[in-house]
Amino acid sequence: MTLTEYARQLRPLIEKAAQSLPDEDALNGVALFPHWAVGVAYTAGQKVQYNGVLYTVLQAHTSQETWTPTAAPSLFAKVLIPDPTVIPEWEQPDSTNGYSKGDKVMYNGVVYESLIDNNVWSPEAYPAGWQVVE
């Protein structure tokens, strides 16, 4: 067996094992996850990569050409906090992947911590949902 054949044999096992990783670890190994593809039966909770970004499947479905992770927010949620040791710029989440209580983001040059789970509002739009981190 060639090395390439062996790698192809191991790939499904690696992708299956990667599904159990917590988001923080998963985002450090996005390449371990399967690429989104048309005609695949996805299950809720499964993680896939699309254009180098990690997404969680929100509901079971068989993918269609127009149901990409970026075009179907009811089916996929982008994993937003890539590394808990790095504070990312705030980005507008969908209702399906809001920031969790304790998540920290940079917004207009200021670090904020979310005070609520499923926080989809900016610190400017909903100040009661955030606190400035000193």
Image (cartoon, rainbow, N blue to C red):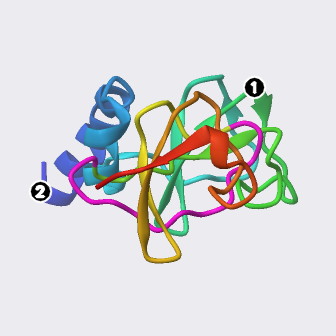
At label 2, the amino acid type is Leu
Residue 48: % across, % down:
52, 45
Q: Which residue is painted at 40% across and 63% down in the image?
A: 88
Question: Is residue 98 among the parts visible in the rendering?
Answer: no
At label 1, the amino acid type is Gln
The magenta span reads 84-96
Work out whether 40 lies above or below 126.
Answer: above
- Please tell me which residue lies in front, 124 or 15: 124
Residue 111: % across, % down:
39, 61
Q: Residue furthest bottom?
A: 109
**Res 59 label:** 1
Q: Is residue 3 magenta?
A: no
Residue 51: % across, % down:
54, 69
Q: Which residue is painted at 68% across and 61% down in the image?
A: 124
Spatial CA distance of label 1 from label 2 is 36 Å
Question: Is residue 76 among the parts visible in the rendering?
Answer: yes
- Location of residue 68 by image quarter: bottom right
Residues tagged 1 and 2 counted as in contact (Cβ below 8 A): no
Disc 2 element: helix
Residue 105: % across, % down:
44, 57
